[in-house]
Image (cartoon, grey):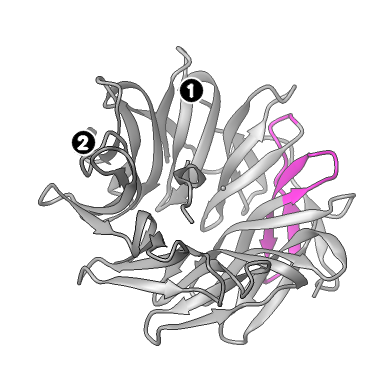
Amino acid sequence: MRFSRSIFATPILVGVTMLSATLPAQASVHYTIKDLGTLGGVDSSATATDGQTVVGGASTAGGAFHAFAYNLANGIMSDLGTLGGTFSRALGVSGNFVIGYSDIPGDGAFHAFVDNLSTHQMTDVGTFGGPDSVLQAIGGHIAIGLSDTAAGTVHALAYDLDTGRTIDVGTLGGTFSFANAVSGDLIAGTSDLPGDIQRHAFVYNLDTAAITDLGTLGGTQSEGDAIDGRFVVGTSTRAAVNGTHAYVYNVDTATMTDLGTLGGGSTDSTATALSGKTVIGVASFPNAVSRAVAYSLNRHTITDLGTLGGSSSVAVGIDKHLVTGFANLPGDASAHTFLYDLSTNTLTDLGTLGGTTSIPAGFTNGIIFGWAFTSGGNQHAAIWLP
């Protein structure tokens, strides 16, 4: 079973209160967009930052697409090269280490890599015996992703950047698993159960090498999408009810709590990220309209973050009390990156590089990263800085 690299190019609480966002206004913090450019080609996108370096992928003058590292201190974008093929993309960074995936010679398969910015050396992490592997996120000295196995299955992968040790996280009894996020010694992900019909969220403890099934909200499927400390968020189906709901799982108490929906006709909800006691995600309606939401675990409130005049919005990242995502403009022909300040309930349009659309990929250490169209219609890696 080979996985496609295209996947890397996103009990009801009683007394939940639904809050509406204010109309678009200026947030208390002003952000400015910056064009990171390319490696000589026309397109690029940013996928991660640690506050000092921004990484992603960019086209070259020769028509290839390579992983890059952009130094925020000197404004230089460096081509990280490949493992011998024509394509590579960086998906995470922590200090001197950049992780991602790259084609190997012949471009018939792609492998996870770790690039050391100090030594300028890209290391092939290899696979579990199959053709492909990816490292897609990093936390501290642990990088996580997935790999094909020799048996034709796909397993979640963890890689220790300090020791170079590769860890097969295994599954919940099925043939497929993948890791989505890491926080300290805990990895959150999703795995098939025996028979590969049901799929559940899991937590893997790096200290004990134990994988724990988080269960569901009563249905047959759940996904573990993000983790912060001892809390996991994701999406789950419910018993005898169509649709999915966002949840938060407390690792210490082994309890999964349904975060509900916005009401007003909304049927589904998903959770995409969390910071402290705030979870962000999306509430969906039957007419294909979606709204970015923020859920306060302390106040048990769901806040509709609104839009920029169009019908839909999506929350992507959160840093303390600030949320970023993208929202449709009037007419729904384009979308812009937004900043929502939860302390003032204000929504700000962060604009583009002169083109029609901008899309954030995340929000780390006060920096929003993603891409935006230029006035010439090219997609460039972009960051928004306070």
Mark 2 surroundings: few (<14), some (14-19) or many (≥20) residues within 10 A: some
Give the Cα distance between marks 1 and 2: 21 Å
Residue shown at 52%/65% (left/top)?
Answer: 176
Q: Circle 1 sits on which residue?
A: 373
Residues in magenta? 283-310
Task: Out of 340 and 56, give the one closest to the viewer.
Answer: 56
Residue shown at 56%/77% (left/top)?
Answer: 173
Looking at the rendered structure, the kind of residue marked 1 is: Phe
Asked if the magenta segment contains residue 309, the reply would be yes
Furthest toward the left, the residue is 119
In the rendered image, residue 119, in percent from the top left (x then y), is placed at: 10, 51
Task: Out of 226 and 204, give the one closest to the viewer.
Answer: 204
Q: Circle 2 sits on which residue?
A: 78
Taking the image as shown, residue 341 lies to the left or right of residue 159, namely: right
Describe the element under mark 1 as helix, strand or loop.
Answer: strand
Mark 1 surroundings: few (<14), some (14-19) or many (≥20) residues within 10 A: many
Residue shown at 45%/61% (left/top)?
Answer: 152
331 lies above or below 100: above
Residue shown at 59%/30% (left/top)?
Answer: 336
Task: Out of 363 and 117, give the one closest to the viewer.
Answer: 117
